[in-house]
Image (spheres, coloured by chain):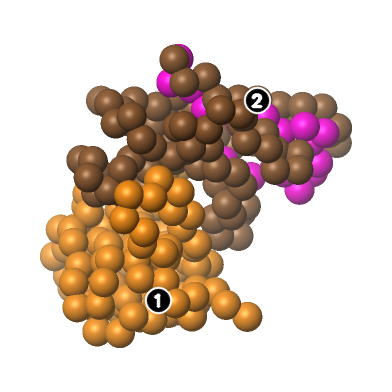
Chain colours: A brown, B orange
Amino acid sequence: AQKITQTQPGMFVQEKEAVTLDCTYDTSDPSYGLFWYKQPSSGEMIFLIYQGSYDQQNATEGRYSLNFQKARKSANLVISASQLGDSAMYFCAMREALYGGSQGNLIFGKGTKLSVKP
Amino acid sequence: DGGITQSPKYLFRKEGQNVTLSCEQNLNHDAMYWYRQDPGQGLRLIYYSQIVNDFQKGDIAEGYSVSREKKESFPLTVTSAQKNPTAFYLCASSIMAAGDRYNEQFFGPGTRLTVL
């Protein structure tokens, strides 16, 4: 079974509007972290935001926020006021505790390609 | 400036040849990682190393080899045994705090390998 599922292969959003990118995860580890990365066409991976499984509040970083619903095992990324430069691939990733089956390494979803329309 | 460098940016290989991809970091990170990315896909872990002179296989290690003789360097060799090596390869590093769920990985710019 996939540990990280991103069900939207591609998304379009109008410039200046908000967009939500979906991510669901599967783990039996009570201690884990969730990450979102952005990958522009140049290829580098840019860290956007982090949410810990014990964090009480949703993480926010500028125009990025993470809608964390622990019971539903979802960690959706919300981008507010989309800009043309937001067009990129977006990857959700999870890190379980070091003693978990994944040895504490990051597990990535397949990504969502976001296109911002002017 | 601290960061991760990968070279070369583009690499072409003939079938049957081994090639080595370079990854260097000056962030003083203990852990280093190699990922493979195929078009339209996520990242898959090839090898990782949490300490000098030690490394572990990831999910798709067959046909690859690594070494970790220095903290700063983690080269990846794509051997002739790798049946379909054409892909984008990303190196990453992170601190290695035991029990810490937050362990952001910093990525290099990547190497695009094409087999001719």
Residue A7: x %, y % from top left: 48, 23
Quadrant the N terminus of chain A occupies = top left
Residue B100 against residue A44 in the figure, above or below:
above
Give the chain of mark 2: A
Residue B103: x %, y % from top left: 44, 53
Side (left or right) of B1 relative to A105: right
Quadrant the C terminus of chain A occupies = top right
Residue A74 against residue A116 in the figure, above or below:
above
Question: Secondary structure beneath disc 1?
Answer: strand
Residue A83: x %, y % from top left: 81, 41
Side (left or right) of B98 relative to A52: left
**Amino acid of disc 2:** Thr
Q: Nearer the viewer, residue A98 or B111?
A: A98
Give the chain of mark 1: B
Residue pushed farthest top? Answer: A72
The reply to whether the magenta stretch includes residue A83 is yes
Residue A77, disc: none
Query: Which stretch did the figure color magenta?
Result: A72-91
Residue A34 against residue B82 in the figure, above or below:
above
Circle 1 residue? B23
**Amino acid of disc 1:** Cys
Residue A20, disc: 2
Q: Nearer the viewer, residue B40 or B44?
A: B44
